[in-house]
Amino acid sequence: MRFGRRTLIMCMTAVAFATAGCANQPVGGSTTPGATAIEYPTKTVKLMAPAGTGGGWDTTARTMQKALQEAGLLKGQSVEVRNVTGAAGTIGLAELVTSHGKNPYQLMITGLVMVGGVVVNKSPVELTQTTPIATLTAEAEVVVVRADSKYTTLKQLVDDVKANPASVKWGGGSAGGTDQILVGLLAKAAGADPKAVNKQYVAYSGGGEVKAALLSRDVSVAVSSVSEFADLVKGGQLRALAVSGAQAQDAGAGTPAPTIKTSGYDLELMNWRGIVAPPGLTDGERKAVSDMIDKLHSSPAWQQALKEKKWDDFYKTGDAATSFFASESARIKAVLTEAGVGS
């Protein structure tokens, strides 16, 4: 299901009126020390994946659904997964905040892409208006070029970008998504003009299109998750210049690719995913939901799922999750605004 521009504007306008009276009220925050959890769950838990089936958020939601059942954490209840598509997750975000307040049985998967979507779609509802529960998983990005490219290091590429931004065309995923965020952050970290670099960014609808564009020389360099390009790097068609995580990582060539930071640029970025609840939960309700997710995280079922799907364990809860959501929202909004995205 795809939303037209008119539909999106109507939805967002309605949300703006609905949230006008409470936009400045704190709705996340930390659980009061010593709060007593309520009995939970005592009915069906509804888990929203704010995107279509088959994508990262949907896969995360359905993996959680299965792991919660296998770990025996539902106390005879069930988890119902529902997809709400549109506008990089911000349609689902708007519904969560405006239609499900004070409901601990309606949860939602979120992630870095949604933070960018808030900026690109000028959403009047932001992630900080939810009740943070936890971050869950993360995956590093990788910067790749063709195997016959003149660039063998990230520094060589960035030096050309700084000297002449128009000389390098970038390919990646949707506007405001993780890939474009990384390009903007890299430009800023290198001292290049983010707006000039952003003008050379070409957004594609999927990883297959990005690969094809790079191999056909429509773009000079491409950015995506490490797993997206691993097969072409392994096959010798592409060269990995750097990964965006904190540790060097094998991007498919059999040897670790250096990090962006060790390449000389003070930057780390992970495509993370997490889970949030609506605003207005009591301390006891938030603690009950958090306790369930905490037990899920430590369960053999979830740990096995992390290994099978090759997801990094990126677990933060409580005050750490609240601070992370707030800092990421501020950081990503700043870099996209500086790059002229969504303006």
Image: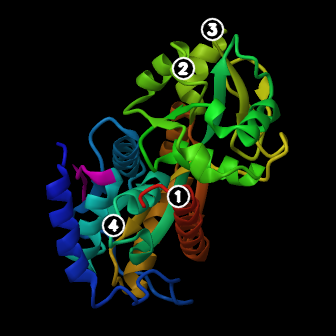
**Which residue bears the numbered disc 1?**
336
Q: Nearer the viewer, mark 1 or mark 3?
A: 1
Q: Earlier in the sequence, mark 2 or mark 1?
A: 2
Q: Earlier in the sequence, mark 2 or mark 4?
A: 4
The span picked out in magenta is: 76-87
Check contact, mark 2 vs mark 4: CB within 8 A: no
Q: Amino acid at mark 2?
A: Leu
Check contact, mark 2 vs mark 1: CB within 8 A: no
> 281 left or right of 33?
left
Q: Using the image as rendered, state which of residue 61 and residue 264 is in the foreground.
A: 264
**Which residue bears the numbered disc 3?**
235
Q: Nearer the viewer, mark 3 or mark 2?
A: 2
Q: Quadrant of residue 328?
A: bottom right
Q: Earlier in the sequence, mark 3 or mark 2?
A: 2
Q: Amino acid at mark 4?
A: Ser
Mark 2 and mark 4: Cα distance apart in space: 32 Å
Mark 4 and mark 1: Cα distance apart in space: 14 Å
| Residue count near mark 2 (Cα–Cα under 10 Å), binned few <14, some 14–19, many ≥20 | many
**Which residue bears the numbered disc 2?**
214
Q: Earlier in the sequence, mark 4 or mark 3?
A: 4
